[in-house]
Amino acid sequence: MPALVKRGKAHEPDTVESLLPVLEQQLPALFGGAQATTASHRKLINSLHALFLRCSVVTTPSADGRSIRLSGEKAFGDKFREMCAFPLGVKKGVDQADRVVKFVAGFVGFAVEHGAS
């Protein structure tokens, strides 16, 4: 007998306002996990990329109405830069900063690789 599939409510499209709490919650958790060990970087990079893709589809019309703004990408980029700069100012140790740099490099490489396909 096949398993029952529960169907939830239809997912409403994200807005910048709905993304900000998600970014505030998930990005620190991802960067915190990346500081602990490099063993889980691949999983964290996949999660970060999925969050980036979710943000990248959020757009808003420009003031003149002729073009669109990539407001979701901008919100992601702002919070991502904040998360990259924060460990550099905190003196937790060289190992944690090295892991964050490796994590960011891994994410950028992953995004470039999957963006080309």
Image: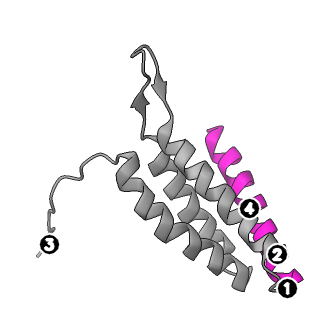
Query: Which label was assigned to residue 97?
Result: 2
The quarter of the rendered structure image containing the N terminus is: bottom left
Is 27 within the magenta? Answer: no
Badge 2 element = helix
Residue denoted by label 1: 93
Residue in view at x 49 percent, y 61 percent = 23
From the top left corner, tell me how far across and down residue 43 is, in percent. 59, 72
Residue 68, compared with residue 99, is above or below; it is above
Residues marked 2 and 1 touching at CB (< 8 Å):
yes
Kindly report the distance in space between the C-alpha atoms of the residues bearing marks 2 and 1: 7 Å
Which sits earlier in the primary sequence, circle 1 or circle 4?
1
Which sits earlier in the primary sequence, circle 2 or circle 3?
3
Q: Nearer the viewer, mark 2 or mark 3?
A: 2
Residue 108, compared with residue 6, is above or below; it is above
- Which amino acid type is marked by label 1? Gly
Residue denoted by label 4: 104
Residue in view at x 43 percent, y 63 percent = 22
Find the magenta span and give its range: 93-117
Residue denoted by label 3: 2
Kindly report the distance in space between the C-alpha atoms of the residues bearing marks 2 and 4: 11 Å
Which sits earlier in the primary sequence, circle 1 or circle 3?
3
Badge 3 element = loop
Q: Residue furthest right?
A: 94
From the top left corner, tell me how far across and down residue 6 is, in percent. 14, 68
Density class for disc 2 (Cα within 10 Å; few <14, some 14-19, many ≥20) is many
Q: Nearer the viewer, mark 1 or mark 3?
A: 1
Query: Is 111 on the left or on the right of 51, as rendered?
Result: right
- Which amino acid type is marked by label 2? Ala
Image quarter for residue 80?
bottom right
